[in-house]
Image: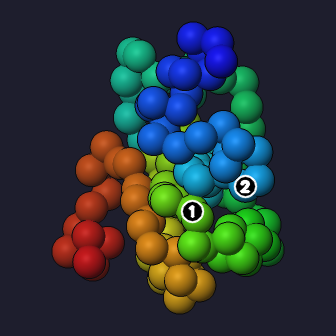
Amino acid sequence: MTKNQDYVENRLNTSLEQLADFPSYFLIENIFACNADCIMCPAKSSRRKRVRMPEETILRLLDEIAGHRDTVEKVQFYLHGEPCLDPDLPEWVSQAKARGIRTVHIATNGSRLDKNMSR
């Protein structure tokens, strides 16, 4: 085993063999848009189009992930966008939980968290 392989296994606390079967962690970028201007964020300088992921794509991903829910550790709605800008984010979290995905996270700058969105 190489140092890189050892690093990945230690960092993810799982074997590469298990990861080859199906990933344990997922980042779903439900929206590529942000209302912040953080100097360290790659989204700031990106030329990518600011768009939401289509509903059918998110549901298809969640369906596939749910088929492996016993080995999936976490689904996180986030990558380079602010997930709370998507008005359907609460629905995506609900859909993931309804499919038996144990751990669902978001990473947010917090600017759009009101009482309803926080719940």
Indicate the amino acid at tag 1: Val
Indicate the amino acid at tag 2: Phe
The colour scheme of the drawn protein is rainbow
Asked whether, in this view, residue 52 is left or right of residue 95, the answer is right
Query: Quarter of the image holding residue 96?
Result: bottom right
Is label 1 in a helix, a strand or a loop?
A: loop
Q: Which residue is nearer to you in this view: 82 or 6?
A: 6
Q: Residue 47: image x %, image y %?
A: 72, 24
> Quadrant where the N terminus lies?
top right
Question: Which residue appears at 55% of the width and 22% of the height?
Answer: 6
Question: Which residue appears at 59% of the width and 84% of the height?
Answer: 99
Q: Residue 8: image x %, image y %?
A: 55, 27
**Extreme residue in the bottom direction:** 98
Is label 2 in a helix, a strand or a loop?
A: loop
Asked if the residue at tag 2 contacts the one at tag 1, i.e. Cβ–Cβ closer than 8 Å, the answer is yes
First-in-chain label (1 vs 2): 2
Residue tagged 1: 72
Q: Which residue is nearer to you in this view: 48 or 14?
A: 14
Q: Residues within 10 Å of mark 2 (few under 14, many from 20)?
A: few
Q: CA distance from mark 1 to mark 2?
A: 8 Å
Question: Which residue appears at 70% of the width and 43% of the height?
Answer: 17
Q: Residue 93: image x %, image y %?
A: 48, 74
Q: Residue 66: image x %, image y %?
A: 66, 76
Asked whether, in this view, residue 39 is left or right of residue 71, the answer is left
Residue tagged 2: 22
Does the image show residue 88?
A: no
> Quadrant where the C terminus lies?
bottom left
Does the image show residue 46?
A: yes
Determine whether 12 is above or below 86 in the image: above
Q: Residues within 10 Å of mark 1 (few under 14, many from 20)?
A: some
Asked whether, in this view, residue 91 is left or right of residue 29, the answer is left
